[in-house]
Image (spheres, coloured by chain):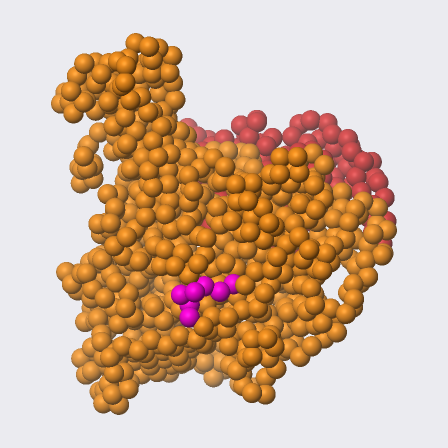
Chain colours: A orange, B red
């Protein structure tokens, strides 16, 4: 029996409605339980001593003074931890040629970036551990550093990891058709150089882990702020020589993640290793400087790209040369080649054209490792694509909306395969653009812009279409050898009081995962969402799953929840039919009671059925199944990824005297398939947009030529604040995926994917009459004034 | 150096309406005292630099950053944290508005954000959206994009003003 989603008056119609999040009330009362809130008996604290050089040989570590500090219990060096913890190598088989050296929990011979952990001090209080860490004397002999991306492969540049032979981590080139011939003969070729700045996630809750090792049970329990508990379980087990079954990862409340908390960090593994050595709970919470120097960075790319068009603005060919520098190591276990690989996969995504070449070159350098951060690769690919499309439109004198309409895949063209060989099941670029035009009243805005210009005020309108990769299959990580589940599961059970408990392998970090699951289970079984308790984030309790990343929670975890809920409904009705001596097909469950499907008349509340099954099973027919616990799993099989699409618009003002950009308004129309909870989807998009706006206008990690990180505090690294952010209008088109009954795709990253490009296009729209253009993010006042020729040196 | 910060100082203060005594290291920040000694884990330490506002609590009637104030400086002070403001239902309408509007995602910024927002609302009237945004600019939220927070605060200001007028 399928759910008639088209009928809003259907019984139990919770999917598609805004219902409150079950876990929000405790958070507004300050009753959340984040890792740092947890205190265990005999718990100790670890602080790390980190390299202050970007590249150095570790000649000696003097720990004597640190050991004298009151409260300090132990000091560990890399060599000591290496005895209980094996190093890892972050490569994946399907990313052909990717290389990276073995990485230890604490550096053993060599430190390769400022902030790499070298020693660990354990004390009875955090303050004492920090005092001790300050007294550990590192004898570091500086080695030559590699900091510049574009010269990393030059013969004159030192090789960072000698054993690897050169500084090339990964290179991939994809060619489709005959781009060279098309570029040679095209009506018009536009080109630009784009730079996206190295930035980071700045979760307000720093990375946090508390690990307890109970030698008597041989059981490790890690309370961890993570997006992927089962992945962490597998990693800790493998590198600390434990059976997976003896590692339990518990993920309670998490204070923001955005991809930052889906990776394996050396200091966190070191914390687990120390817990195993000391046989007592060890807590590590990064401080803010540690967050800036050791949370993964992302988006450090330089790109030369060109686009060939005909006289009507039809895209003929695209050519992209992407370079990215990933720091000193590829990050375990997802690797740091994915972002560049995504740029190759995603450029030109919305458009129907035939000739394509894209190459990514991924190099090592002595900086903090980069890896997957919200919308991985998308903001880069969208900026390249949409920047070039706008350039072509301006050169040909075509309106930016019109040129996109001439090139986007037709809404009835699907399924199609893009020149990058991405397969699209069903997208809605044209419908989304139409919706955007209506929401923003494009023509009126153009009139307002013209009126402002007449007053000498420079306003700009930016448009950016995009695609977003969601619901990944094993093609993302599993085929490369990583123990990262693309499948997810849900167990749903009915308790004697008729209430429902759902245990899911996807996790909650504030997106509203648990609310979404409660709605789906409520509709699937036939109860109110308030009667569904959701349990996530405990590897010993929930079905095995991947967790929450790559916008998979609703699409994968949600479908597993729906299937398990429907199975439970069937099991309940089978018992009910026997008890009521009715035909099972004539019964339904609505609002917590078994009813006649035709009339809706109540036959029996679920709590009565529960009472009989659990306490008076003797009264039921012998042999009647009474399995009020059901588990189902879901994995996508038809498509490697479920692509979504959308389009954003920005209206902003550039002060040409100060270079300051004021965001006036922002729009996003998004097609994430079936919407389960409209409010949660809209707020995911708004939050994502603002993270993208940060990358466009403010966020940039600065290093000097020696590899010293220069702005490692929130006072120096700017993130969006309330006063600078615009109100955002969100609209939707719904094209459900046919791969699942639920039809949901992901929505978590669309905002971040498109926002930098749309701001860039709006700024350049504002500056066009002044013959100025910016393509180097973030668009700081200085960069804008330089583009205007008002600063020169 | 560190020994000096460890010297103990005796303090007496009121936290959420209850008398509290403590002997605190001279270098301990108020946020750490509240979290570690009082078990009040609602307000959080995030930047520890006075920038993000996650540690905001109310001290003698004003919103203060718990990471910038020493516990020793709180001797004699009256302190309210989100836990106390919840128990007394002092900000119930604001909390309900945050939940209804989904003005929180991970919730890590929320306790500090609520104290800062209440300070603005306590001034009375209906602040403009720009004023709300300005007032909350010292409180970072990395999840929501702020619009829902502004909506929630605005709706409470309107409701309270309406009640006052009625
Ligand atoms: S932790 Fe106090 S302002 Fe950030
Ligand atoms: S809700 Fe996560 S930082 Fe504000």
- Magenta stretch? A90-96
Residue that appears at 85% across and 44% down = B7
Q: Quadrant of residue B44?
A: top right
A92 is within the stretch colored magenta: yes
Q: In this view, does A680 lie above or below A477?
A: above
Q: In which quarter of the image is residue A224?
A: top right
Residue that appears at 49% across and 53% down = A262
Q: Residue A718, can we see it?
A: no
Q: Where is residue B54 in the image (x, y as percent from the top left)?
A: 59, 46
Residue that appears at 29% across and 75% down = A389
Judging depth in this view, the residue of B28 and A37 nearest the camera is A37
Q: Position of residue B100 (x, y in %)?
A: 40, 36
Residue A381 left/right relative to A589: right
Furthest residue toward bottom: A184
Q: Position of residue A169 (x, y in %)?
A: 50, 73
Give the position of the N terminus of chain A as an image quadrant: top left
Residue B60 left/right relative to A189: right
Q: Where is residue A771 in the image (x, y as percent from the top left)?
A: 37, 83
Residue that appears at 37% across and 16% down = A614
Main SS category, magenta section: loop
Number of numbered tags placed on the structure image: 0
Residue A705 left/right relative to A437: right
A181 is within the stretch colored magenta: no
Give the position of the C terminus of chain A as an image quadrant: bottom right
Judging depth in this view, the residue of A10 and A777 nearest the camera is A10
Q: In this view, does A182 lie above or below A257?
A: below
Q: Residue A250, can we see it?
A: yes
Q: In which quarter of the image is residue A750?
A: bottom left
């Amino acid at each position: 029996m399928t759910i008639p989603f088209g009928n809003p008056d259907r019984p139990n119609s919770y999917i598609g409605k805004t219902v409150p999040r079950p876990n929000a009330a405790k958070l507004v009362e300050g009753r959340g339980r984040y890792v740092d809130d947890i205190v265990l008996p005999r718990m100790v604290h670890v602080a790390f001593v980190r390299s202050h050089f970007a590249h150095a040989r570790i000649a000696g570590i003097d720990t004597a003074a640190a050991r004298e500090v009151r409260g300090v219990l132990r000091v560990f060096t890399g060599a000591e931890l290496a005895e209980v913890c094996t190093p890892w190598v972050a490569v994946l088989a399907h990313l052909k040629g990717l290389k990276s050296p073995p990485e230890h929990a604490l550096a053993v011979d060599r430190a390769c970036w400022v902030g790499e952990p070298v020693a660990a001090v354990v004390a009875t209080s955090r303050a004492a551990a920090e005092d001790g860490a300050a007294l550990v004397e590192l004898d570091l002999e500086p080695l030559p550093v590699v900091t510049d991306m574009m010269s990393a492969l030059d013969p004159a540049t030192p090789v960072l990891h000698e054993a690897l032979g050169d500084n090339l981590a990964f290179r991939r080139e994809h060619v489709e058709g005959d781009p060279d011939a098309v570029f040679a003969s095209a009506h018009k070729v536009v080109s630009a150089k784009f730079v996206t700045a190295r930035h980071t996630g700045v979760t307000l809750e720093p990375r946090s882990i508390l690990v307890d090792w109970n030698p008597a049970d041989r059981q490790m329990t890690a309370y961890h702020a993570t997006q992927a508990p089962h992945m962490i379980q597998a990693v800790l087990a493998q590198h600390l020589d434990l059976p997976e079954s003896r590692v339990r990862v518990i993920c309670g409340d998490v204070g923001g993640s955005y991809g930052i908390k889906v990776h394996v960090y050396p200091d966190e593994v070191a914390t687990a290793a120390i817990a195993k050595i000391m046989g007592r709970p060890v807590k590590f919470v990064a401080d803010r400087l540690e967050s800036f120097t050791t949370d993964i960075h992302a988006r450090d790319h330089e790109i030369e790209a060109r686009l060939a068009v005909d006289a009507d603005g039809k895209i003929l060919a695209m050519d992209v040369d992407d370079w990215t520098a990933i720091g000193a190591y590829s990050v375990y276990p997802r690797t740091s080649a994915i972002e560049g690989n995504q740029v190759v996969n995603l450029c030109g995504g919305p458009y129907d054209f035939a000739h394509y070449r894209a190459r990514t070159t991924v190099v090592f350098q002595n900086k903090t490792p980069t890896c997957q951060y919200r919308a991985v690769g998308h903001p880069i690919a969208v900026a390249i694509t949409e920047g070039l499309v706008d350039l072509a439109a301006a050169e040909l004198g075509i309106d930016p909306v019109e040129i996109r309409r001439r090139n986007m895949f037709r809404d009835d063209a699907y399924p199609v395969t893009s020149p990058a060989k991405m397969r699209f099941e069903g997208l809605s670029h044209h419908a989304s653009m139409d919706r955007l035009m209506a929401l923003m009243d494009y023509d009126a805005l153009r009139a307002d812009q013209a009126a402002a210009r007449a007053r000498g005020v420079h306003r700009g309108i930016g448009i950016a279409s995009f695609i977003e990769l969601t619901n990944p299959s094993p093609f993302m990580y599993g085929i490369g050898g990583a123990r990262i589940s693309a499948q997810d599961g849900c167990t749903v059970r009915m308790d004697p009081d008729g209430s429902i408990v759902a245990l899911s392998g996807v996790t909650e970090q504030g997106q509203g995962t648990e609310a979404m699951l409660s709605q789906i289970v409520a509709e699937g079984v036939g109860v109110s969402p308030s009667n569904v308790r959701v349990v996530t984030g405990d590897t010993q309790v929930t079905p095995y799953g991947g967790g929450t990343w790559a916008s998979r929670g609703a699409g994968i975890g949600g479908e597993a929840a729906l299937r398990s809920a429907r199975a439970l409904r069937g099991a309940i009705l089978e018992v009910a039919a026997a008890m009521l001596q009715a035909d099972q097909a004539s019964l339904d469950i609505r609002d917590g009671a078994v009813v006649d499907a035709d009339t809706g008349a109540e036959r029996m509340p679920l709590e009565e059925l529960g009472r009989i099954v659990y306490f008076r099973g003797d009264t039921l027919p012998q042999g009647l199944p009474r399995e009020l616990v059901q588990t189902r799993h879901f994995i996508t099989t038809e498509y490697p990824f479920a692509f979504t699409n959308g389009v954003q618009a920005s209206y902003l003002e550039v002060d040409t005297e100060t270079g300051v950009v004021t965001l006036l308004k922002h729009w996003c129309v998004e097609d994430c398939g079936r919407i389960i909870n409209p409010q949660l989807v809209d707020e995911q998009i708004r939050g994502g947009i603002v993270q993208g706006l940060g990358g466009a206008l403010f966020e940039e990690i600065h290093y000097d030529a020696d590899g010293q990180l220069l702005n490692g505090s929130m006072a120096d690294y700017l993130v969006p604040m309330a006063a600078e952010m615009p109100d955002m209008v969100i609209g939707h088109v719904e094209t459900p995926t046919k791969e699942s009954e639920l039809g949901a795709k992901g929505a978590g990253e669309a905002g971040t994917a498109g926002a930098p490009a749309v701001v860039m296009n709006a700024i350049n729209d504002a500056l066009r009459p002044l013959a100025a253009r910016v393509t180097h993010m973030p668009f700081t006042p200085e960069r804008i004034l330089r583009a205007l020729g008002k600063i020169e040196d | 150096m560190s020994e000096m910060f460890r010297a103990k100082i005796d303090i007496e203060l009121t936290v959420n309406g209850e008398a509290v005594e403590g002997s605190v290291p001279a270098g301990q920040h108020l946020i750490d005292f509240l979290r570690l000694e009082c078990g009040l884990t609602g307000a959080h330490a995030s930047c520890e630099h006075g920038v993000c506002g996650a540690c905001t609590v109310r001290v003698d009637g004003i919103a203060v950053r718990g990471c910038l104030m020493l516990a020793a400086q709180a001797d004699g002070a009256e302190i309210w944290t989100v836990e106390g403001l919840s128990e007394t239902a002092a900000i119930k309408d604001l909390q309900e508005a945050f939940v209804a509007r989904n003005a929180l995602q991970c919730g890590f910024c929320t306790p500090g954000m609520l104290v800062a927002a209440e300070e603005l609302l306590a001034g009375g009237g209906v602040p403009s959206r720009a004023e709300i945004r300005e007032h909350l600019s010292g409180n970072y939220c990395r999840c929501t994009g702020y619009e829902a927070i502004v909506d929630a605060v605005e709706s409470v200001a309107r409701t309270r003003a309406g009640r006052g007028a009625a």
